[in-house]
């Protein structure tokens, strides 16, 4: 039996799909044959991504979703299911960062990061699982953690705490949902150049930092697609409860 990486006949929903990692994953899943549902807070930010996928021959739908608002999540899933049918794959990608020293992180900043990165993953995962159980779908939920789930960095106390929680939540979800045929895994990206950090990594300081990564460079967004396709497809049917670092061995160097 050869592994099947195809997503033909599947529907995949990706949160935080307006740019960066989420947009790249959505395009990759569409190329693998999935009908893709791109979710973000503002629909207008998804229009270009939707058009690009359709021009490449894929099927795509945009839905408004605020992962800090459970009613918004439920509405988005209902809209997606009404248009494309049952959802088989969910990529829990939406996340935020507010880099600050521990002593300078106020409650508003901490709550914003935790509400998005932890409660958002929790609520999207819960609504997704409920949808899959009701539709009798054996699905795959993939949570996007971070290299900072494995180690700390100065100025990222709240962010690292949130991503460490995602790592543990992924394990717990996998145990609770396996009896329904739902697999839950994660990826932990290292540093990838996106719209959010492009200014830093184009600077002299950013370029010098990139060279300190064991791989000697930043990751490229297409390098996330291999692990995602493995976890989303039948090729990964016996992989459950694990998170795969995609970071050029960066996590092994963190203390």
Image: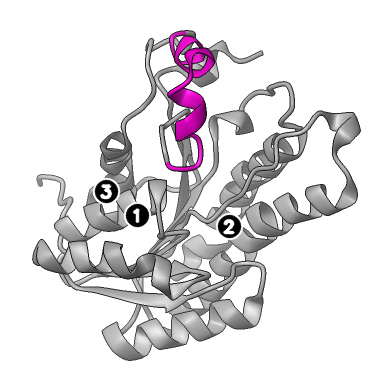
Residue at (33, 39) in percent of width and height: 224
Q: Which residue is mark 2?
A: 173
Q: CA distance from mark 3 to mark 2?
A: 20 Å
* Nearer the observer, 42 or 53: 42
| Residue 196 forms part of the magenta stretch | yes
| Label 1 with label 2: CB-CB less than 8 Å | no
Against 112, residue 88 (above or below) is below
Task: Determine the CA span between mark 1 and mark 3.
Answer: 15 Å
Q: Is residue 236 visible in the rendered structure shown here? A: no
Q: Dot 1 corresponds to which residue?
A: 23
Q: Main secondary structure of the magenta part?
A: helix
Q: Secondary structure at mark 2?
A: helix
Question: Total label count?
Answer: 3
Span highlighted in magenta in the image? 195-211
* 191 in the magenta segment: no
Q: Earlier in the sequence, mark 1 or mark 2?
A: 1
- Decide: is 221 above or below 66: above
Residue topped by disc 3? 229
Q: Residue 195 at x, y = what percent?
A: 43, 42
Where in the figure is residue 18, as x and y percent of width and height?
41, 59
- Characterize the local packing of mark 3: few (<14), some (14-19) or many (20 or more) Cα atoms within 10 angstroms: many
Residue name at image x 44 percent, y 17 percent: 249
- Above-or-below relation of 95 to 61: above
């Amino acid at each position: 039996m050869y592994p099947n990486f195809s997503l033909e006949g599947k529907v995949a929903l990706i949160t935080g799909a307006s740019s960066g990692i989420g947009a790249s994953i959505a395009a990759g899943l569409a190329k693998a044959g999935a009908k893709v549902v791109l979710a973000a807070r503002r629909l207008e930010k998804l229009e270009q991504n939707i058009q690009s996928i359709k021009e490449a021959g894929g099927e795509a739908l945009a839905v408004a979703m605020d992962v800090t608002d459970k009613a918004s999540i439920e509405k988005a899933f209902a809209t997606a299911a009404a248009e494309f049918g049952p959802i088989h794959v969910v990529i829990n990608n939406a996340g935020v960062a507010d880099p600050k020293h521990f002593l300078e992180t106020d409650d508003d900043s901490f709550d914003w990061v935790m509400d998005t990165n932890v409660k958002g993953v929790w609520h999207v995962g819960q609504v997704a699982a409920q949808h899959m159980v009701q539709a009798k779908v054996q699905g795959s939920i993939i949570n996007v953690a971070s290299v900072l789930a494995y180690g700390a960095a100065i100025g990222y106390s709240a962010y690292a705490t949130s991503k460490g929680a995602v790592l543990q939540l992924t394990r717990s979800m996998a145990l609770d949902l396996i009896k329904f045929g739902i697999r839950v895994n994660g990826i932990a990206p290292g540093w990838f150049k996106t719209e959010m950090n492009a200014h830093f990594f184009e600077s002299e300081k950013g370029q010098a930092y990139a060279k300190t990564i064991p791989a000697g460079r930043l990751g490229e967004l297409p390098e996330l697609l291999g692990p995602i396709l493995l976890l989303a497809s039948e090729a990964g049917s016996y992989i459950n409860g694990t998170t795969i670092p995609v970071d050029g061995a960066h996590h092994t160097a963190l203390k």
